[in-house]
Amino acid sequence: MILIRNGRTMDPATGTDLVQDVRICGGKIVETGKNLPEAFHGIKTGTDGADSEKAADGEKLTDGGKPADDEKLTVIDAAGCVVAPGLTDTHVHFRDPGFTWKEDLMTGSRSAAHGGVTTVLCMANTSPVMDSPELLREMKERAKSCPVRVEFASSVTKGLKGRELVDMRAMAGAGAKAFTDDGIPLMDEKLLMEALYQAAELDLPVSLHEEDPLFVPGPGVNQGEISQILNYPGASAQAEEIMTARDCILALHTGARICIQHISSKRSVDLVRLAKSWGAKVSAEATPHHFTLTEQDVLKYGTNARMNPPLRTEEDRRAIIEGLKDGTIDMIVTDHAPHAPEEKNQPMEKAPSGIIGLETSLALGIRTLVQTGELSLMELLRLMSYAPAAYYALDPVRIAPGSRADLVIFKENETWTAEHFASRSSNSPFLGWTLPGKIHYTICGGRIVCGGNEDEL
């Protein structure tokens, strides 16, 4: 059992913001209020003998509604801290199976826990590709031992080859939460339309990587001023905008839910805003690196600022922030993409794209969006917890009795330095930055998975 005392509880599902205690028992929140006693005598029963508040599934309670004898109490003093639902990151690469020297389920999960993230959605570009129900069931079974909740997306096409659809119904039945060929654009419109029709029937979203290869002669760096300085071909914003426009139209006509992944261009944001006004079921996600950095940072951070889509101009960065503010962009995710040092320590044209982001995402949101007055902390938490969880039907957490006890406890203005990462990789332009929002505890399923005595985790 855990008793969190005197925390500023912020629940973006309801907008609740108040100082109170939170009691956790059996993996669930069982009680909230002021000055809760350490002693807990279980769920109160009504006059008819039935529980007036039913114990949630999995609670470790005795027949009398009391904690079991072996249920030890941990008291966390959260005075001065924010207590919020654990973050949900619906765009991560844990490189498992196939590329586990970069990351695996366990190291990725620990990285998530250190970033206050309690639920992740893994992309399908593994080896083998996540395109069979058998592999999906195997990975879901392995994920049960992870310190955070790990869910999986199915690929849209077999082998990510863009030629043949996976058995979408079978993948949904095995537990896929979405379909995506992330990292590779779907160029066959007819095939994509069929995928969208099937996804609409299954009521699952299709998440899309929007880069037309015709306009990407040099991936990872924006085609513009900086690519010219580097004498590097670069990736044009047109690559994203053309695909975004096409897929917004396809979503409108198929009725499917689509998510434009890691949006990076001002015109792409405008296109999503327009498509939403038409009634298309189009959503978009933004990453902390795209709303914090610009193409100018490539000169400073080199290949650790190379990503697909690339960092773009200040005008694009501002448009992403405006999209977050007005609801055009629905969620903040990281596109956590680990790479080994020897891979990144190559010339720009040879290095892989992508950076890690799980452990710096909340901090960058506070630094770039909250401390600058662009968003309130509550709005940031909604974009990083409730919104992505709701979109992918991942059971959003609430700070209320009966809810799953997935929480992050942090001090909004306390600074820390990004010196070491729990991830197996360290490919980040934010290494060495002093950032706000120090995380003190992450709790998942009622278990402390970051903070306290981490040697026992």
Image (tube, rainbow, N blue to C red):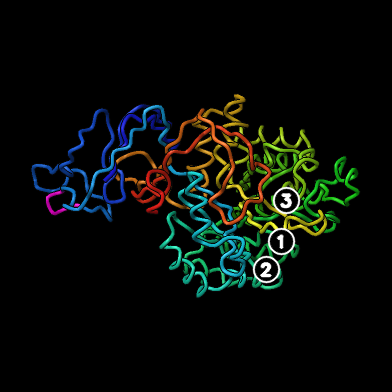
Q: Nearer the viewer, residue 385 or 37?
A: 37
In this view, the mark in front (3 or 1): 3
- The quarter in which the C terminus is drawn is bottom left
Q: Quadrant of residue 37?
A: top left
Can residue 14 be seen here? The reply is no
- Cα separation, mark 3 vs mark 1, equals 13 Å
Is 95 part of what is drawn in magenta? no
Dot 1 alpha-carbon crowd within 10 angstroms: few under 14, some 14 to 19, many 20 or more: some
Q: Nearer the viewer, residue 282 or 4?
A: 4
Counting residues from the N terminus, which is met first, the one under dot 2 or under dot 1?
2
- Cα separation, mark 3 vs mark 2, equals 19 Å
Can residue 240 be seen here? The reply is yes
Q: Amino acid at mark 2?
A: Leu
Residue assigned mark 2: 160
Is residue 191 placed above or below 221 in the rendered structure?
below
Dot 2 alpha-carbon crowd within 10 angstroms: few under 14, some 14 to 19, many 20 or more: many
Residue assigned mark 3: 307
| SS of the residue under disc 1 | loop
> Residue 246's spot in the image, x, y percent?
74, 53
Residue assigned mark 1: 184
Is residue 428 placed above or below 205 in the rendered structure?
above
Residue at x-position 78% and y-position 57%:
346
Q: Amino acid at mark 3?
A: Met
> Residue 261's spot in the image, x, y percent?
65, 50
Residues under numbered marks 2 and 1 in contact, where contact means CB atoms less than 8 Å apart: yes
Dot 3 alpha-carbon crowd within 10 angstroms: few under 14, some 14 to 19, many 20 or more: many
In the rendered structure, the answer to whether residue 46 lies left or right of residue 384 reads left
Counting residues from the N terminus, which is met first, the one under dot 3 or under dot 2?
2
In the rendered structure, the answer to whether residue 454 lies left or right of residue 424 reads left
In the image, the segment drawn in magenta is: 61-65
